[in-house]
Amino acid sequence: MIDALKGKNRNNPSNNFLSLLKYLGDEFVDKKIIDPANTNNIIAEDLYKYEKRAIQEKARESRSQK
C-alpha cells in the first residue's frame, strides 16, 4: 500500500484514502508486494487470486459511492 501513497500529501487523508481505493481497484491484484523488512517474504502470496479480486471489487464499489 506504500506505492498507493507515494508522493501524496500526508495532511490530506480524504484524498489519500481515495488514492488507496484507486490503487486497490486498479493495481492490487497483479502487484507483487514484498515485505520491506524481509525481502524473502512476498506478502502478495498470502492471498489467493479470488481474495484479491474481492478486495478489488469492493474498492471499486467504494470509489463509486458518494
Image (cartoon, grey):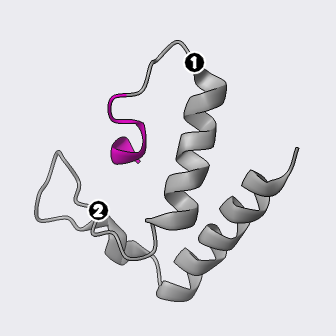
User: In the rendered structure, does residue 4 fall within the stretch colored magenta?
Assistant: yes
For the record, the magenta segment spans 1-7
Mark 2 and mark 1 residues within 8 Å of each other at the beta carbon: no
Q: Nearer the viewer, mark 2 or mark 1?
A: 1
Image coords of residue 53 (percent x, y): 58, 79
Secondary structure found at label 1: loop
Q: Give the label on residue 12, or none.
A: 1
Image coords of residue 22 (percent x, y): 57, 53
Q: Compute the Cα span from label 2 to label 1.
A: 25 Å
Along the viewing direction, whichever of 52 and 66 lies nearer the viewer: 66
Which image quadrant is residue 44 in? bottom left
Q: Residue at x 37, y 76 (%)?
A: 30
Instruction: Classify mark 2: residues with Cα within 10 Å, few (<14), some (14-19) or many (20+).
Output: some
Q: Is residue 64 left or right of residue 66?
A: left
Residue found farthest to the top: 11
Instruction: Classify mark 1: residues with Cα within 10 Å, few (<14), some (14-19) or many (20+).
Output: few
Secondary structure found at label 2: loop
Q: Earlier in the sequence, mark 2 or mark 1?
A: 1
Q: Residue at x 33, y 29 (%)?
A: 7
Image coords of residue 8 (percent x, y): 41, 27
Dot 2 amino acid type = Ile
Decide: is 65 above or below 50. Answer: above
Q: Is residue 7 left or right of residue 9?
A: left
Q: Give the label on residue 33, or none.
A: 2
Decide: is 35 above or below 66. Answer: below
Number of numbered labels in the structure image:
2
Q: Residue at x 60, y 23 (%)?
A: 13
Residue found farthest to the right: 66
Q: Give the label on residue 51, or none.
A: none
Along the viewing direction, whichever of 37 and 20 lies nearer the viewer: 20
Which image quadrant is residue 16 in? top right
